[in-house]
Amino acid sequence: MAAYAGTQTQLPCTLMPLATRSSRRSSIDIWPGFVDALSQMVMVIIFLLLVFTAGQFYLGIALSGRDQALQQLQQQVEELANLLALERRTSEELRSGNLTLASQLKSALAERDQLRADLEAKSTSLAQQQESAAARSNELEARAESAEKALSAEKEISRQALAQVNALNAQIATLRDQLSRIAAALEASEAKVKEQQGQIVELGKRLNLALVNKVEELARYRSEFFGRLRSILGDRPDIRIVGDRFVFQSEVLFAPGSAELGEEAKKQLAQVVTALKEVSDKIPPDINWILQVDGHTDRRPISTAQFPSNWELSTARAMSVVRFAIEQGIPASRLATAGFADQQPLDSANSEDAYRRNRRIELKLTGR
């Protein structure tokens, strides 16, 4: 502004005819200083904008992992960054305008130098040329004042943007405090969960121990049941124990291709039912036992009106055994049946002996 004041006090002097050369030179030499000061001011503003933009960038990185509320705040910060970028572009346009003004000032100075050169030769046109130079200087001053006002407006916008950033920082600090409280609550909840998990593990161990005891007790009754069946049925090659199952060859109970129990088969099964009743009377009520009856066939397919496939035949034979057991007084809730067709063979060979072994009824005393 001091430069403006000097210009305003000295420009009227250029209108005076026959002024000294030293006074005219001092009025012209003020403009380079004014241009340098204006350029430095623009550079400072650009530097501040760059620092602010960099701060916004790192602030965005620091907040990228927050929850939805933080993301909304980040979007607001990004909008402010866009405004600042727009302001920076405006500043660049103003700087370009200032450069244009500087170029025009140089042009004006060149014109004034030309006027000085022509002053001695053309004294009659000196006044007109000085008036033209003064008018051009006034125009440049008006442009400079307009640029200064624009810069002031940009400073005000930057100040408002900084105020909004400070408000956002305060909100972020509040959110961080809330997150720390939530984290503390989660830690307390995790500690409670760990304690409950320990109790669950202890209960699981007790339950497993109880189940093992029940399984062992049921295995003892199963051994007793199989032992009685062995003593009742005798040592027959077509009735044997395989693992935890008592196996009847199908020929003992059924005719080929049939699921009807014969009289001899019913006598054999009646002995099995009797042994099961004797053993079941000793089994405690808290042991939930069942007698599972599984039917199996050999791999040779069957296709009749009654049995379209081996699945129907194996299932029908198992169901015949279960129905007979129910008729003999075994509760239906203690019986289960399944048909496996030829999918669970004991012998995979293609021979009559293998076929005979695979055609079977299996009894298994187990728990639910």
Image: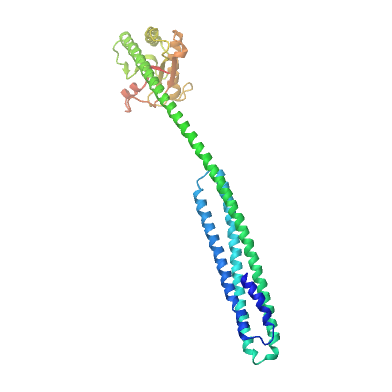
Left or right: 59 in relation to 368: right
Q: Residue 307: where, in percent of width, then height?
A: 46, 22
Residue at coordinates 60% horizontally, 58% vertically from top-left?
158
Left or right: 52 in relation to 153: left
Instruction: Please determine whether, in this image, residue 233 is positioned above or below residue 183.
Output: above
**Considering depth in this image, is 198 or 274 the residue closer to the camera?**
198
Tell which residue pokes out farthest to the bottom in this image: 121
Which colouring convention does the figure follow? rainbow
Q: Residue 174: where, in percent of width, then height?
A: 55, 42
* Residue 323 visible in rendering: yes
Q: Residue 340: where, in percent of width, then height?
A: 41, 24
Residue 197's quadrant in the figure?
Answer: top left
**Considering depth in this image, is 345 or 167 the residue closer to the camera?**
167
Left or right: 149 in relation to 225: right
Residue at coordinates 35% horizontally, 23% vertically from top-left?
358
The number of callouts visible is 0
Q: Residue 349: where, in percent of width, then height?
A: 31, 28
Residue 218's quadrant in the figure?
Answer: top left
Instruction: Please determine whether, in this image, residue 103 is positioned above or below residue 77.
Output: below
Residue 202's quadrant in the figure?
Answer: top left
* Residue 362 visible in rendering: no
Identify the image quadrant of the C terminus.
top left
Identify the image quadrant of the N terminus.
bottom right
**Considering depth in this image, is 13 or 122 the residue closer to the camera?**
13
Left or right: 175 in relation to 14: left
